Image (spheres, rainbow, N blue to C red):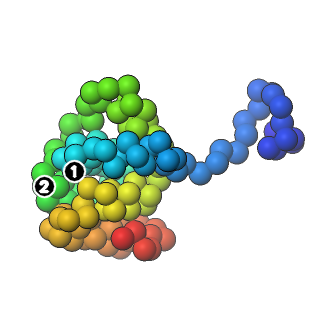
Amino acid sequence: CANGSACAFCHLPHPKRAAHLDKKHRDALRGLSTEKAKAMMVPLLWEKVFEVDRSRGAASAFEAFARACGVRHDAPPAPSSRSDRALIATLSSLSLKLLLSTLQRSALQDDAVARRAADDLLEQLRRSASLPFSGAR
């Protein structure tokens, strides 16, 4: 659309703002147990990793990460409430980097093994896809 952010209404595509967690979603994430946060985010993270890198190395690194988290990556998140569904929808719109860093800051904060597995996964993605990931801790 030629009017950009000043557009009142039209049917043309508009650039979207980068996805982020607003205060309501951050509070909802803080209210989840570590296990539930991992169960929500790990399958979403798998989808994002698979979009970026379908190599055997990435799959192996991700499986090690999922095992370290104690979550099956092939089990879709099961929302138990309306707010869980909204949180899952917002999490799924985040970039791979932002989703992984959100997971590390929340559910993996006290889990050194899972954090190391996340670092290994990130390193694998850097090597195989040459993506500009940095500072995801």
Q: Which residue is mark 1?
A: 34
Q: Residue at x 59, y 51 (%)?
A: 18
- Residue 90 coordinates in the image, percent (x, y): 46, 40
Q: Residue at x 77, y 32 (%)?
A: 12
Q: Is residue 88 left or right of residue 11?
A: left
Q: Is residue 39 above or below residue 98?
A: above
- Residue 70 coordinates in the image, percent (x, y): 12, 51
Q: Is residue 129 above or below residue 7?
A: below
Quick one: 1 or 116, which is closer to the camera? Answer: 116
- Residue 127 coordinates in the image, percent (x, y): 35, 73
Location of residue 73 (image quadrant): top left
Q: Residue at x 82, y 44 (%)?
A: 4
Q: Which residue is mark 2?
A: 67
Q: Residue at x 25, y 70 (%)?
A: 120
- Residue 37 coordinates in the image, percent (x, y): 27, 46
Distance between the alpha carbons at the discs numbered 1 and 2: 15 Å
The secondary element bearing badge 1 is classed as helix
Of the 4 image quadrants, the one containing the N terminus is top right
Quick one: 84 or 66, which is closer to the camera? Answer: 84
**Nearer the N terminus, badge 1 or badge 2?**
1
